[in-house]
Every structure is written in C-alpha cells, then in structure tokens.
Amino acid sequence: MKIDVLTLFPEMFSPLKESIIGKAIEKKIINLELVNMRDFSKDKHKKVDDTPYGGGAGMVIRPDVVYDAYNSLKIKENSKLIYLSPQGKTLTQEKVISLSKEEHLILLCGHYEGIDQRVIDVLNPEEISIGDYVLTGGELPAMVLIDSVARYIKGVLSEESINEESFSNKLLEYPQYTRPEIFLNKKVPEVLISGHHENIKKWRQEQAIEITNKKRPDLLKK
Ligand code: 4F9
C-alpha cells in the first residue's frame, strides 16, 4: 500500500519508524511518503497560514498551499483522500479493515485552527475522526489510522495475531501470561500449563466473554 501524508510537521511521524510498522516500511510492504506542505508555500518566508477572516483566535492554513501540495502527488483512479477531522465519522475496526484494502491512501493533516474550507470543499476528502476530543492537529490521528490499517496488510503481522486479536470476534482479549510460573506468589492459571489445547481454547473463550461482559458490556450488545 502507498500512503502519502500531507502535513506541516513530517518529523512528528518518527514513531512509525519503530517496531512492527517500522519493519513494514523497511520491507516496502508500506510505501510511506511524508510531504511537507511548507515546501509548497510561495511566500519568501515560507508562510503557510494566516489569520482567520472574520476574526478569532489562531491561524488557518492557506488553501493554495494545501492544493498545490495535493497536486504534486501522483493521483490515480483508486487514490483515496482522507482528512483527519473531529467532524468525520469515528474510526472503527470495520472501517480500518475496509481501508486496508485500498491501494493508495492520502492523509491530509490540519493543524492550528484548521484548513481554509474552500480547499476542503474542492478536494472533497472523506473525513475521519479518531474520537470526540480535540487535538492540536491531524498528525496523531493519521498515525493511529496508519498503525491500525497496516496491521491488516499481508506480511505486516503473523497470521495468528490477526485472527486471535481483540475485536476480530467483537470480544476483548483473554488474559496473557508468560514466565515465571510463580510471580509474587501468584500462579499462572493451571489450564495454561496443562498442554490440553482444547481446554485452553475453551478457557480463553470463556475469559474473553467474561472480561467483555465486565469491562465493555456495550460490545456484547452489538
Ligand atoms: C482529528 C481529532 C481526528 C480527532 C484534528 C484537531 C482530530 C483533530 N480525530 N483535532 N485537529
């Protein structure tokens, strides 16, 4: 999958160089391009924002800067533009799975008080929120989207991790244990060291249901 990110803060994306997503980028399973929209400022001081018409606090990103940055990309029929915004539909695991089937994602990140509405109207992105809270910009939501989507791309995770995870069956995960067998006088549940695979599977399923019922009963109702 190709992922282009339009941002004024490309350096904020360094967490994606670590761990599983970092490996996927190294292996070119994900082709991540960070495009600094500041490079598309025509201003001699590289200014990209200005005060809002009508007054009010903060700065608004100029539409021409965003438009020129967008048009510098190789856009194809199947390219999908997403604007990370609190006005969008909230990202769900189902949406993550459907996005993971796309060939090319373009993630537009606002900052400050946002982006001039005219370029949003012209580019007509799908707006996606990661939850009902306000952030300083779309960069963290873009990283959340990339991380969640990348996990469904073939070769990023082991096959088991995908099927056994939380939400794949609409349940929370069962508890996990590793060595030592006794920690602070607490023993690992006996069934897990029994070697009886059928009993282990059954126990884990029961635990998943019990934990979901206790912590997130709303998930069971769905
Ligand atoms: C974007 C918050 C997506 C939640 C972008 C300020 C945002 C956001 N989900 N907040 N800029």
Image (spheres, grey):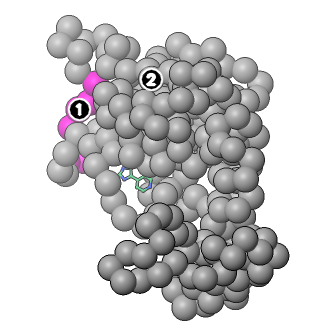
Task: Pick the residue in front: 12 or 131.
Answer: 12
Determine the secondary structure under disc 1. Answer: strand
Q: Which residue is mark 1?
A: 50
The C terminus lies in which quarter of the figure?
Answer: bottom right
- Residue 47: percent from left, percent from top: 23, 21
Nearer the observer: mark 2 or 1; the answer is: 2
- Residue 146: percent from left, percent from top: 54, 41
Decide if residue 118 is in sight here.
no
Dot 2, how many residues are within 10 Å of its Cα: few (below 14), some (14-19), or many (20+)? Answer: some
Task: Pick the residue in front: 44 or 199.
Answer: 199
- Queried whether the magenta region covers residue 131, the answer comes back as no
> On the rendered structure, is 68 left or right of 148?
left
User: Please, is residue 165 above or below residue 136 in the view?
Assistant: below
Quarter of the image where one finds residue 78:
top right
Identity of the residue drawn at 41% across and 83% down: 186
- Distance, label 2 to label 1, CA atoms, is 23 Å
> On the rendered structure, is 105 left or right of 43?
right
Magenta span of residues: 48-55
Identity of the residue drawn at 69% across and 44% down: 158
Figure disc tally: 2
The N terminus lies in which quarter of the figure?
Answer: top right
Q: Which residue is mark 2?
A: 34
Q: Mark 1: is the Cβ under 8 angstroms from ligand 1?
A: no
> On the rendered structure, is 82 left or right of 6?
right
Identity of the residue drawn at 72% across and 71% down: 195
